[in-house]
Amino acid sequence: MIALLLLISGASAVIVGDLNCTTYIGQTPVTFGYSQSATVCSNTIADAACDIIYPPVAAGKYPAPGNDVERPFNCYTITKTSGGAFSADMKTAALNSCPKSCGYCCQTNSYNCKNVQFPRLNCATITPSQCSSVAWRTIIAEDCPSACGFCGQGGCVDAVPDCANDLSICNTVGLQDFVNTYCQKSCQRCQTSTTTTRSTTALCTTYNPNSSAACSAWALNGFCSNPFYTVAQRKKYCATTCKLC
């Protein structure tokens, strides 16, 4: 399809050579502009370094949503002329280092995946603020992962982006309700990634007494099922409450 678009656009379009991450914006002449997802990611190296490696064709002008400036030549070709022969190696290097500067974010691993067939929201209208919203992040990860760079996460993300700053909260008894809801990725609480170790209790008739008076409260906060606590720890402190032989 991209090849067909190139033939249609010919020399009349400013963006030439590679029309990925673009959308049709005009007919007279046929014109393509960068899509919202073209620059939604961050460069993997410093922006200043990308400016040197991928100098803009027009001074100071890089791809941005809606504009139609030509991509820096080094993003897709070894030539220094407009519409030069496409080089897969040059593009791979651009994707791995400076995808934002080259307008290739939509083809990076984090953004290049299929959304569910029947999402609960319109994937095409998701905003950057929704991508960082506690209310929206988990839903977007499940239904529209390509909109926020959640591809490859298995639908499992933290609702609160800063959970990973202090992983000790994953084991804090009084925070289990919080981390189970808001820190599923960092604390490995997503259904797709969490395996709860359980002891076989069908033949048990008695259990060792609890060694802690707080077991009832701990159990309410997930101590007996939290995979971050070993079976040995549960037996040591709350064998009766957790029904461990």
Image (tube, rainbow, N blue to C red):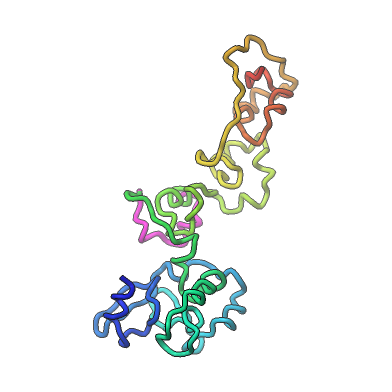
Which residue corresponds to the image point at 52% horizontal and 74% vertical from the top-left? 94
Q: Is residue 14 visible in the rendered structure shown here?
A: yes
Which residue corresponds to the image point at 51% horizontal and 77% vertical from the top-left? 90
Which residue corresponds to the image point at 50% horizontal and 89% vertical from the top-left? 59
**Position of residue 137 in the picture relative to residue 123 (left or right):** right
Farthest-out residue, top: 205
User: Does residue 66 sit above or below 116 in this rendering?
Assistant: below
Q: Quadrant of the C terminus?
A: top right
Image coordinates for residue 215, horizontal then vertical, percent: 67, 23
User: Does residue 210 sit above or below 57 in this rendering?
Assistant: above
Q: Is residue 175 magenta?
A: no
Which segment did they paint magenta?
Answer: 120-136
Q: Splitting the image into 4 quarters, where does residue 242 fall?
A: top right
Image coordinates for residue 114, horizontal then vertical, percent: 39, 55
Which residue corresponds to the image point at 71% horizontal and 19% vertical from the top-left? 210
Towards the viewer: 61 or 2? 2
Image coordinates for residue 102, horizontal then vertical, percent: 49, 76
**Position of residue 47 in the picture relative to residue 105 (left or right):** right
Image coordinates for residue 63, horizontal then vertical, percent: 45, 78
User: Does residue 58 sit above or below 145 in this rendering?
Assistant: below
Q: Is residue 221 visible in the rendered structure shown here?
A: no
Towards the viewer: 94 or 129? 94
Q: Is residue 132 magenta?
A: yes
Q: Quadrant of the N terminus?
A: bottom left
User: Does residue 35 sit above or below 193 in this rendering?
Assistant: below
Total residue callouts: 0
Towards the viewer: 81 or 45? 81
